[in-house]
Image (cartoon, rainbow, N blue to C red):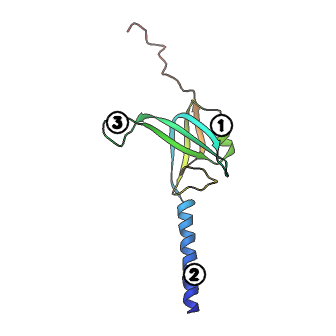
Amino acid sequence: MKKFGWIVGIFLIVFLSVFMWWKYFFVFGEGVKAGSLNYFVKKGVVFKTYEGRVVQEGFQSPTAGALQSNEFRFSVIDEEVALQLERSSGKFVELRYKEYNGTLPWRGASNFVVTEVLDIKESGKASTSGVPFDQ
């Protein structure tokens, strides 16, 4: 009976370890998103994390005929990336991110963690310098 208990115990530890790794540390997806940086804040009660939101061009909606802005909510771990984003509110940003299956309190409130800022551009209307007003 002792041998059976050891086998079950080891199997349980291995299963829980693999599950925890898959849930919290396995990178499910990677990619790039771009849009206007709506806000970027450092918040939290116990763990202070950087959280932000990018509003992307275009609209999406779960129901036909309704409009909803396309938002990308994310967290940031790296201080250097956070400093870049703190100075970029309202600007057009291009961000590289990793997607995890679960959130950890010290990693932020989002499954999406931004790892790099690829580009920052001034946000504004398209240039109409070559188009006359009377047209």
Residue at position x 55%, y 85% in the image: 7
- For mark 3, does the 10 Å Cα neighbourhood hold few (<14), some (14 to 19), or many (20 or more) residues? few
Q: Are marks 3 and 2 in contact (CB under 8 Å)?
A: no
Instruction: Please state which amino acid type lies under the numbered disc 1.
Output: Gln
The disc placed on residue 84 is 1
Residue at position x 55%, y 34% in the image: 38
Q: Nearer the viewer, residue 116 or 110?
A: 110
SS for callout 2: helix
Q: Which residue is mark 3?
A: 66
Residue at position x 64%, y 54% in the image: 106
Q: Which quarter of the picture shows residue 59?
A: top left
| Label located before the other in sequence (3 or 2) | 2
- For mark 1, does the 10 Å Cα neighbourhood hold few (<14), some (14 to 19), or many (20 or more) residues? few
Q: Which residue is mark 2?
A: 9
Instruction: Please state which amino acid type lies under the numbered disc 3.
Output: Ala
SS for callout 1: helix
Instruction: Please state which amino acid type lies under the numbered disc 2.
Output: Gly
